[in-house]
Amino acid sequence: MANDNRVGEIEEEEATPLLWESAEPEPVENRARAVKTKVPEVEVHLYKQGKGPIDVIKMALGGWDQDQLEVREILEKYGFKSVYAFTPGSGRGVSIRFNPRNGRSLLTYRDGAVVYLDGESKVKKSRTAFMPKCDAIARSDAFCGIMVMLRRN
């Protein structure tokens, strides 16, 4: 067998440049492009139990088609248990229903719409406010005790 383990020099050939250098560099165009789209918004006039408006806010619409109101965000921010849409002239309102999974309204809204919402606060009146007032002498009275029992049920 012949010895193939020879050490030799590697001959280098002059490589041609991959990019040709020109005398003047070409201007590079700004390739960063920004797409500006308008996010659909509604103006919300927020009332609390018919009093107000306590706040006027602009809210972005959400959802796949960007036409749903973020109801859960309003409920959490202002401490409401429910909100009602109404028209200021008539005073009649309808409860705004929303999807419990994503918190968005089931009804859709247009971009630039003005929505009037009336919120019902989470704070409940205590039951003691509805009980008859009995003084120390009358508390032993059977009538006062019966009235208290009836009010509790």
Image (cartoon, rainbow, N blue to C red):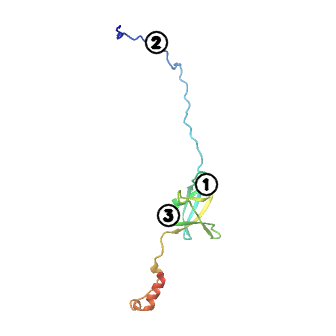
Across and down, in percent, residue 17 comes to: 49, 17
Of 151 and 87, which appears nearest the observer?
151
In terms of sequence position, does the residue under pointer 2 or pointer 1 come before the other?
2
| Eye-nearest disc, 2 or 3 | 2
Which element type, helix, strand or loop, lies under badge 2? loop
In the image, which disc is placed on residue 78? 3
Q: Amino acid at mark 1?
A: Asp
Instruction: First in sequence, mark 1 or 3: give its number.
Output: 1
Residue 88, percent across and down? 62, 68
Q: Which residue is mark 1?
A: 67
- Estimate the spatial distance between the alpha carbons at disc 1 and disc 3, rounded to whole Å: 22 Å
Mark 2, residue position: 14
Residue 58 location (% of width, % of height): 56, 57
Q: Position of residue 33 (x, y in %)?
A: 56, 37
Question: Tag 3: residue type?
Answer: Tyr
Residue 135 visible, this angle: yes
